[in-house]
Image (cartoon, grey):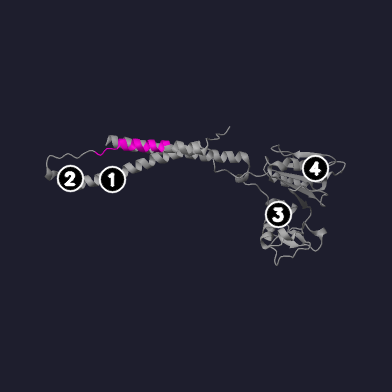
């Protein structure tokens, strides 16, 4: 079980109290010894050397105080709740018709095991790969060839709706119903020679933008389109187009011919990696505090021996 830490308000109070105590004890401890000489003549000769010694001692004392205060702050930060965390990936439900199950299996295998589920849309929805379950060697399509896309999509929606996840449906034709967080991925799109296949957009009653970014083409008919845009209010402005094109480019890896471009890095591996990353930061702060205290102890011991 990972250390969850104390609230930052408590950590700030502890750091303030600890730092104030260190400063008070430091100034109570620091004393510059008086230089005693038998005569005024000897004092005049020793005065320049005494000034140089005092300045060096002051510098050492301030470095000593800075070292202690940094150690106190590092300990307080190590005990506090972590704020530097890895971004958690939302859950993804991949629903596939029997003919598209092989392509959907590649997508599920490329996703985070703790956030990806693969559902076959047979006569009854069949969960082939669940959250954190080991992947099957090969997904076997239903033998009778029956397809029930609506029930499979409803199941996928239940698994992802509470955590702002997404549903991807793999099929040769659009399903009769898609959840609000669902996307249809058409099978068999022609791939570009140097990248994943393009998105085809049909503009229905909406002015087409002057230029389309790479990877996005205009479809002549709704039947040949992957996305139909008919909302002038949301997508008719340059800002709206940029948002739409950005979202489509982010989803290009889910096409069947571009699956090799889909990967989940370690920094996006979900809650477990987030906790491990926070643990690494806490360990680093503890190590920093230990090194500073060891340096301070060495400095103090050296002064005692001199």
Give SS at disc 3.
helix
Picture quadrant where residue 145 is located:
top right
Image: magenta residue range: 17-32
How much space separates mark 2 and mark 1, taking CA atoms? 16 Å
Picture quadrant where residue 304 is located:
top left
How much space separates mark 4 and mark 3, taking CA atoms? 23 Å
Q: Residue 278: where, in percent of width, then height? A: 55, 40
User: Seen in the image, is 294 located left or right of residue 232?
Assistant: left
- Residues 304 and 85: in front is 85
Please tell me which of labels 2 and 4 falls first in the chain: 2
Please tell me which of labels 1 and 4 falls first in the chain: 1
User: Seen in the image, is 44 located left or right of residue 67?
Assistant: left
The residue singled out by tag 2 in the image is: 46
Please tell me which of labels 4 and 3 falls first in the chain: 4
How much space separates mark 3 and mark 2, taking CA atoms? 79 Å
Q: Residues within 10 Å of mark 3 (few under 14, many from 20)?
A: many
How much space separates mark 3 and mark 1, taking CA atoms? 64 Å
Q: Is residue 286 visible?
A: no
Please tell me which of labels 3 and 2 falls first in the chain: 2
The residue singled out by tag 1 in the image is: 56
The residue singled out by tag 3 in the image is: 252
Q: Residue at x 38, y 41 (%)?
A: 67
Give SS at disc 2.
helix
Give SS at disc 4.
helix
Q: Residue at x 44, y 38 (%)?
A: 15
- Give the total number of marks visible in the rendering: 4
Q: Residue 227: where, in percent of width, then height? A: 76, 57
How much space separates mark 1 and mark 4, taking CA atoms? 76 Å
Q: Is residue 271 visible?
A: yes
The residue singled out by tag 4 in the image is: 152
* Marks 3 and 2 close (CB-CB < 8 Å): no
Q: Residues within 10 Å of mark 2 (few under 14, many from 20)?
A: some
């Amino acid at each position: 079980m990972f250390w969850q830490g104390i609230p930052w308000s408590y950590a700030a109070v502890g750091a303030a109290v600890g730092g104030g105590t260190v400063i008070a004890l430091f100034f109570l401890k620091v004393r510059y010894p008086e230089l005693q000489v038998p005569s005024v003549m000897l004092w005049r000769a020793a005065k320049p050397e005494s000034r140089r010694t005092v300045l060096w001692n002051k510098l050492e004392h301030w470095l000593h105080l800075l070292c202690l205060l940094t150690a106190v702050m590092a300990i307080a930060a190590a005990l506090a709740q972590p704020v530097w965390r890895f971004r958690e990936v939302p859950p993804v439900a991949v629903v596939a018709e029997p003919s598209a199950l092989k392509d959907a299996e590649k997508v599920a295998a490329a996703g985070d095991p703790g956030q990806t589920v693969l559902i076959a849309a047979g006569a009854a929805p069949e969960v082939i790969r669940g959250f954190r379950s080991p992947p099957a060697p090969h997904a076997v399509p239903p033998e009778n060839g029956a397809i029930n896309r609506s029930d499979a999509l409803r199941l996928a929606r239940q698994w992802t709706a509470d955590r702002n996840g997404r549903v991807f449906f793999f099929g040769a034709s659009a399903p009769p119903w898609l959840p609000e967080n669902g996307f249809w991925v058409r099978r068999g799109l022609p791939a570009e020679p140097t990248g994943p296949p393009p998105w085809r957009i049909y503009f229905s009653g909406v002015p087409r933008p002057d230029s389309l970014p790479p990877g996005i083409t205009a479809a002549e008919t709704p039947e040949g389109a992957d996305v139909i845009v008919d909302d002038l209010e949301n997508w008719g402005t340059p800002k709206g187009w940029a948002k739409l094109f950005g979202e489509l480019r982010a989803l290009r890896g889910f096409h069947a011919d571009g699956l090799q471009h889909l990967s989940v890095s370690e920094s996006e591996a979900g809650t477990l990696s987030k906790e491990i990353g926070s643990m690494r930061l806490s360990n680093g702060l503890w190590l920093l505090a230990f090194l500073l205290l060891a340096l301070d102890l060495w400095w103090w011991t050296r002064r005692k021996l001199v």
